[in-house]
Image (cartoon, helix red, strand yellow):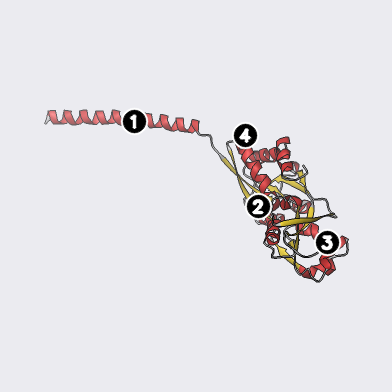
Amino acid sequence: MVQSKILILTIAAILTVVLFVSGCADTGNDSGMESEQEKVTIITVSAAASLTEAFTDIEEQFEDENPTIDINFNFAGSGTLRMQIEGGAPIDVFASASQSHMDILNNQSLIIEDSRKDFAANTVVLITPVDSELNISTPEDLISEEVETICIGNPETAPVGKYTVEALEETGLWDELESKTLLADDVKQVLVYVERGEVDAGFVYSTDAATSEPDTIEIKATVPTVTPINYPIAVLSASEHQNEAQTFVDFVTSDEGKTILESYGFTA
């Protein structure tokens, strides 16, 4: 009996030592993994649809230089994005194609005013399907009875639509063209309608026209706008990652960011 008890106590002691050593080894490994893998912060950037290509390129270079920050994009019409922010969407940065949508958020204290910067400019152009047989070379030509459908962005949600309507009102064309217009959610949708030949003409940003599918559209005219097309960017007041968000804003407005934007046709 005594020998059995001694044997049991000996085995228990050995197991205790083994478990202790194993526990120490596991703790050391966890510590090593934490030191090797830095914590990555994900920030969400809501950006105007017209920035899709340029910002996707900016994302790649930004993340190369800032490996602890991961960018998650939300592209749509600026008005749609603004309403999402007003509704409490967890957004860290807003990049708008319109000053007015940023102003609305600023008036509600939803952006950090000191972080707001203008970073790009654009122009509106009139485009038609490449195989169009209609004689269209200026906005005035759209009055022709042969022109049945013109696509523009919804002025309520897509700044390109608002810029277009203002320009057509300024030249006295809007009253005659309004009944022909098909409203799109954003500038990308306008471009797709024209590329597919589903409309006779459309108004898009020059930068979007430059990203069209090869041999699908023709740029007919640059349209002077009443309001300058300037893009502002800002950090959201409700952001839980304001330092990282500001780092992204700083990159977009840096010389490197400007170079990328200019490569996509924006005036930085």
Q: Residue at x 76, y 70 (%)?
A: 148
Q: Amino acid at mark 3?
A: Pro
**Cα gap from disc 4 to disc 3, whole angstroms:** 45 Å
Contact? badges 4 and 1 (CB < 8 Å): no
Q: Position of residue 222 (x, y in %)?
A: 82, 54
Few, some or many residues within 10 Å of mark 1 (<14, 14–19, 20+): few
Q: Is residue 226 left or right of residue 181?
A: right
Name the N-terminal-most of marks 2 and 4. Answer: 4
**Cα gap from disc 3 to disc 1, whole angstroms:** 78 Å
Question: Mark on residue 139?
Answer: 3
Residue 250, compared with residue 228, is above or below; it is above
**Quadrant for the N terminus in the image:** top left
Q: Amino acid at mark 2?
A: Phe
Instruction: Give the structural element (helix, strand or loop) at label 3.
Output: helix
**Cα gap from disc 1 to disc 2, whole angstroms:** 50 Å
Q: Position of residue 81 (x, y in %)?
A: 68, 54
Q: Amino acid at mark 4?
A: Glu
Q: Is residue 247 left or right of residue 225?
A: left
**Cα gap from disc 2 to disc 3, whole angstroms:** 29 Å
Name the N-terminal-most of marks 2 and 3. Answer: 2
Question: Mark on residue 22?
Answer: 1
Q: Badge 2 is on which residue?
A: 75
Q: Position of residue 49 (x, y in %)?
A: 68, 53
* For discs 2 and 3, the disc positioned in front in the rendered view: 3
Which of the pair 152/137 is nearer the observer? 137
Residue 209, compared with residue 10, is above or below; it is below
Instruction: Give the structural element (helix, strand or loop) at label 1.
Output: helix
Q: Badge 4 is on which residue?
A: 65
Instruction: Give the structural element (helix, strand or loop) at label 4.
Output: helix
Few, some or many residues within 10 Å of mark 2 (<14, 14–19, 20+): some
